[in-house]
Image (cartoon, rainbow, N blue to C red):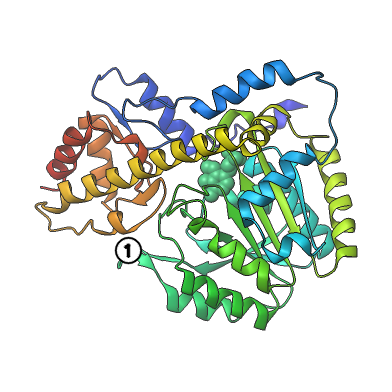
Amino acid sequence: MFESLKPAAVDPILGLMAAFREDPRDNKIDLGVGVYQDDRGRTPVMEAVKRAESKLMELEKTKSYQGIAGDAEYNSRMLALMFGDGHSILSSGRIKTLQAPGGSGALRVGAEVIKRARPEAKLWVGVPTWPNHIPLLGGAGFEIEEYPYYDMESRQINSELMMETLRKVPAGDVVLLHGCCHNPTGADLTNAQWDEITEIALERGFIPFIDTAYQGLGDGLEEDAYGMRTMAAKLPELVIASSCSKNFGLYRERTGSITFITQTAEQSGIVAAQAMTVARQLYSMPPAHGALLVSLILGDKELCSDWKAELEEVRLRIKSMRILLADSIQDNAQGMDFSHIKRQNGMFSFLGVKPEHLVRLREEFGIYIVSSTRINLAGINSSNINYLSESIKEVLK
Ligand SMILES: Cc1ncc(COP(=O)(O)O)c(C=O)c1O
C-alpha cells in the first residue's frame, strides 16, 4: 500500500530550523521559527503558567475524559478575554465558544462547520497570509480566492486595492482576516480600516473569519481586540479562531478556541452541536492541560494581573527590538528604508532584502531567515543585535 506514496514536501520553516540546529557556529541567529524568545534567546515557561501548574497539581482530581466542547470555565473566560466585560454580544445568546487544539485546530473546526453550513462558499485570504492557512482551511474543501493585502513596494497595507476587492466579494463567501500582529507582514489593520471592512461585510453580506493568534502582542490586550469587538457588535455572523500558544506561551499544550456568532440564539445551539460533531470526527476532544492553566490564570485576580504584566514585558521587548533593528540598519549602502519595521506589530516583519542577500546571510553569517524575508523580531536580543545589523549592512554593500 505505502509504496504508492511520494515523499511529502518539507515545510520550508522546518527545513530551515533543521539547518540552523546543525550549524556549528556559536554566533548563528534564528529569525525563522515563530516562537517568542527572551533576551537570552530562551522560550521560557511564563511565571504565571508555572504557578498555575503548581496549583493545578493540587486541584486536579481526575484525568477522565472531558466534554467535546472542552472546559466550560475556560470557554467563558476566553470569551471575557476576547470581548472584555460588558460587550453586548456576551448577553445576546448568539455566541458560542468551544475549546480547540490550538489556533490551528480552531481554524480547521471553524472551516469544517462553515463548509457544512454553506458548501458553495469560497474562502478569501489576503496576500500574503500565514502559509499554513491554505492547507489548514483548504483541507476542509474550500475553493480559495485571494484579496490583495500587503504592498511590497510601499511596505504597507494596500488599503485601496484590498477594499476594492472586498467590495466585490459575493454574499455568503467567507473572508479570512488576521485579528492583530499579521503573520507574516506585521502590517495590521487600523481601527478605521476595521470599521470600513465591517461596513463592507454588512453591505455585501460576506462572513468574516478572524484568526486571532497574538492578542496582547501588538498594541495591548484591549487594543488588539478592536476588530473582533467591532465586528461582533455590528455583524449578524462572525467566526473567530483564537490561540493561547503565543500570549500564554503554551505552544505545545495545543490551547485555543473557536467562536461562532450567529443571527439567532437558536442557530447558535445548532452551530455548537455541529462543531462538536466535527471535533468528534477529527480528534474527539481537545487536550485539557493548557486550557485548565489558562482558566486558572484568567479566573484568579493576582495570577491574571501577573500574567498581564509578563505579557506586557514580552510585547515591549519585541517593540524595542523593532526600533533597535530598524535604526541600526537604516544607514546602509543601498539606501534601503527599513522604517516600516518600527511601524509594524507583533513578532514579524518582512526584511525586504533580495534572495541573494538571504543566501549570504545564511551561508556567510549563520543568520537564518525564511525565503519570504519574514523575520521573527523576538529572535533578536542585546547580545546578537550588533552582529545582526552589521551582517545585514555588509550584504547590502
Ligand atoms: C496567524 C496564525 N494563526 C494561527 C496560528 C496557529 O497557532 P497554534 O500554534 O495555536 O495552532 C499561528 C501560529 O503560528 C499563526 O501565526
Q: Is residue 378 left or right of residue 88?
A: left
Q: Which residue is mark 1?
A: 155
The image quadrant of residue 386 is top left
Above or below 187: residue 382: above
Amino acid, disc 1: Arg
At 39% from the left and 21% from the top, the residue drawn is: 21
Residue name at image x 82 percent, y 19 percent: 62
Is 21 left or right of 293, judged from the image as shown? left
Q: Quadrant of ligand 1?
A: top right
Residue 272: % across, % down: 84, 52
Q: Residue furthest front?
A: 301
> In the rendered image of this protein, does residue 384 appear above or below residue 115?
above
Q: Position of residue 335 (x, y in %)?
A: 12, 58
- For the residue pair 15 and 299, the one nearer the viewer reads as 299
Between 98 and 332, the residue placed more toward the observer is 98
Q: Is residue 121 above or below residue 292?
A: below
Task: Give the percent coordinates (x, y) of residue 309.
Answer: 45, 39
Q: Which residue appears at 29% of the width and 50% of the height?
A: 351
